Image: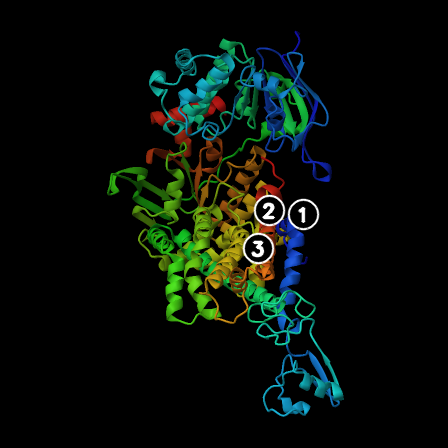
Amino acid sequence: MSAPLLEIDNLTVCFGRGAEAVIAARGVSLALSAGETLALVGESGSGKSVTALSIPQLLPYPQASHPTGAIRFEGESLLDASSERLRALRGRAFGMVFQEPMTSLNPLHTIEKQIGETLRIHQGLTASQARARIIELLELVRLPEAGARLGAFPHQLSGGQRQRVMIAMAIANHPRLLIADEPTTALDVTIQAEILELLADLKQRLGMAMLFISHDLNVVRRIADRVVVMQSGELVETGSMTQVFSEPAQPYTQMLLAAEPEGRPAPVRDAPALLETRGLRVWFPHRGGLLKRVTGHLKAVDGVDLSIRPGETVGVVGESGSGKTTLGMALLRLQSARGEILFNGQDIARLGKRALRPLRRELQVVFQDPFGSLSPRLSVGQIIGEGLGVHRVGRDPAERGALAREALAEVGLDPALAERFPHELSGGQRQRVAVARAIVLKPRLVVLDEPTSALDRSVQVQLVELLRTLQSRHGLSYLFISHDLTIVRAMSHSVLVMQAGQVVEAGSAEQIFTAPQAPYTQRLLSAALRTG
Amino acid sequence: MPRLNPINQRRWAQFRANRRGWWSLWLFLVMFTVTLFAEFVANDRPLLVHFDGDWYLPAVVSYPETTFGGDFPTEADYRDPFVAELIEAEGWMLWPPVRYHYDTINYDSESAAPAPPSRQNWLGTDDQGRDVLARLIYGFRISVLFGLALTLASSLIGVAVGAVQGYFGGRVDLFGQRFIEIWAGLPVLYLLIIMAGFVQPSFWWLLGIMLLFSWTQLVGVVRAEFLRVRNFDYVKAARALGVKDRVIMVRHALPNAMVATVTFMPFILTGSITTLTSLDFLGFGLPPGSPSLGELLAQGKANLQAPWLGLTAFFTLAIMLSLLVFIGEAARDAFDPRKTLGGRS
């Protein structure tokens, strides 16, 4: 083997000083040869990003420090390089692609100016030379109509297009190493697949090495030659792609690989629908002109008919912006909408606040972000007990406390947690608290708005199990909103596929997953199969 | 500190870590407590009199001169050598450290008013022969109390208005904002001067008039905070539970807005004190004769030959406002999440 392009030797990354110091990565050693793709994989908090960011020294120094270790790039030590030398290397020798394409581009400059900047600094090109090169780069990253897009601002591009611009900036100076930090995580599955393909192709064509950081082993499987698995700041396993996937040595890697939700929901009995919508619409007006007259509408939800039977789970699938969350909020009457919402035969779409209050008990919700959905200043017991107080369930605070502890036990948490505050719990525990808050009122329908997507894979599996158990025990109906097809498959009896506010396909889960009819559904499924 | 949650404990530690703010807080609290009991620090009545075997509390209760064997049924003037002799013949008097009330005129000063600092009048007398130190103590108290009352009242109104605007948004917010913009465009000082022409401004009148214009200061921050919070998942979850709007605002949204409010308050306090001082300086403030720092400043300007007047007022104001700004800075640091929560980016 030739001398490696990049070598990290016993690197430690530390934040803060003295007693309060937090070690984010400890004793990390790895090597990357020219032209190779190395994947750095781990769950959140495993130290993969800080390790990668120490290579171009982009951590917030001096809070961050490296008590031990060395980083050598083509034999040159980076940790004690001067800041001028590092500036010359950044952008020229390393290219970086980040997770959030929205925030990593400057919203106030055109894409020509942003890509041109790095060309001017590192290659000293003139404006006209740069322009030709920029068009060439944009064609290389397959941005459609590259020439016409030079004057575009980031907000005029879609997420996938912005990520292509980021990649164009990263490769502008022929870097020898491309560092990609979760480059596809914020993108929809169909676009994820395209970007992964593009990265693999560019790497081939330009002969770069790539350090690819991801929490998702399945994304990595398509692109990497070798894998490094990290857990809480330490390396747990290194090996070639095939080796790690076929015979993972460490239990942690095995768990990451095995964490796929399995099984199917219990069958439902035929019964009249619990909830039905007819022609449900949520339109947001666009206003323009001097008098702010309505010039058009953004049709977030456009004529959706759905029906949920008692004990049934209806999965709603679609990419971001397809209107699935808006649909859920409209059903809960948290978002004003037109059309009919029949709950138990009663049209609730036009009920006033007061008339709606008793019905709130029957319709509950669990949100995506377990950090944002629990009030940080209330204890777990207070959070769960709040709804009981509103609906006068339980005669006195003591009885409500008992009910709250019962609900905690039911979602598989220690009832003693009632005294704790949300910040003392892990993400999975918080999401269980959110479920307990919903089921303590004994609702009949729960809207689950991406309840699993902020959690690590292994925790997702447990949550799916829990939700299915609760469903069969209490005969709950779920509206399960998710972009994650594997989880929808494991949860749902029937599925709605949404695109741009409309239902493009609806049917039983079996039918949709095995024989999709609409071209959009087919595209979604094949992209998901390729990445996941 | 009992019953502080961990975030507040860290904030408290952060506040204490700002040594300047911490010492300023202590100094200010000492000065405020001392002046709060001004009647026992600077008074023309003794604190305690022992006369003919009985105990008297002239600082609190008013006794006629006849009680001590004098001639008049009016209240005893304890500074009168005649009365003092009467009392001292049969007992003794305990005086406060400064033997002047803010409106006591020192008739036996050796030089003409304004008299320079002397052993009798430590900071001299003003142009009406009143002890400057005594007036300073009472003036400090009235300034701080006025500032506190105005800050508290305008925060209450401002938080309530901002909360309603931010939480409900839409038309309520639109009209509220336009009203505040117009209201803030009114020339406050002129209005105060005009109103001072209609009513004799007392402490409470001034407070009310200034409150009319100072409540808008917090509306913006609180409104912004509520606009942000109302889309949080836990607020949506509470609405899905059927919790009443009023309860959501107080229980879930208000704690978020408190950080901005508490950070802002010391600066509103300094602003209020400065406004009162400038009104007093112009002569549109507290009724004539009241002890006030602004009035002392005006006297200093009118009597440049007596620099102790202007200097005293200047140093008092400078020290008081600097202390408050330092405290405010420390409070701002304490509530800064980047400092409190470890500052990782």
Q: CA distance from mark 3 to mark 1?
A: 21 Å
Question: Which mark is nearer the camera, 3 or 2?
Answer: 3
Q: Quadrant of residue B191?
A: bottom left
Co-location on one chain, circles 3 and 1? yes
**Which marked residue is nearer to the observer: mark 3 or mark 1?**
3
Q: Amino acid at mark 1?
A: Ala
Structural distance between the alpha carbons of marks 2 and 1: 10 Å
Q: Are marks 3 and 1 in contact (CB under 8 Å)?
A: no
The quadrant the N terminus of chain A occupies is top right
Q: Chain of mark 3?
A: B
The picture places residue A288, in percent across and down from the top left corner, at: 26, 38
Whether the residues at callouts 2 and 1 have beta carbons within 8 Å, the answer is yes
Residue at 72% x, 28% y is: A67
Q: Position of residue A286 (x, y in %)?
A: 29, 39
Name the amino acid type tagged 2.
Asp
Q: Residues within 10 Å of mark 3 (few under 14, many from 20)?
A: many
Determine which residue is flagged by label 2. Answer: B333
Disc number for residue B321: 3
The secondary structure type at the circle numbered 2 is helix
Q: Position of residue A346 (x, y in %)?
A: 32, 54
Describe residue B305's horizontal placement relative to residue A507 as left or right.
right
- Does any portion of residue A384 appear in the rendered image? no
Colour basis: rainbow
Q: CA distance from mark 3 to mark 2?
A: 18 Å
Chain letter for the residue marked with disc 2 in the picture: B
* Sooner in the amino-acid sequence: mark 2 or mark 1: 1
Q: Is residue A467 visible?
A: yes
- Reading the image, the residue beneath label 1 is B17
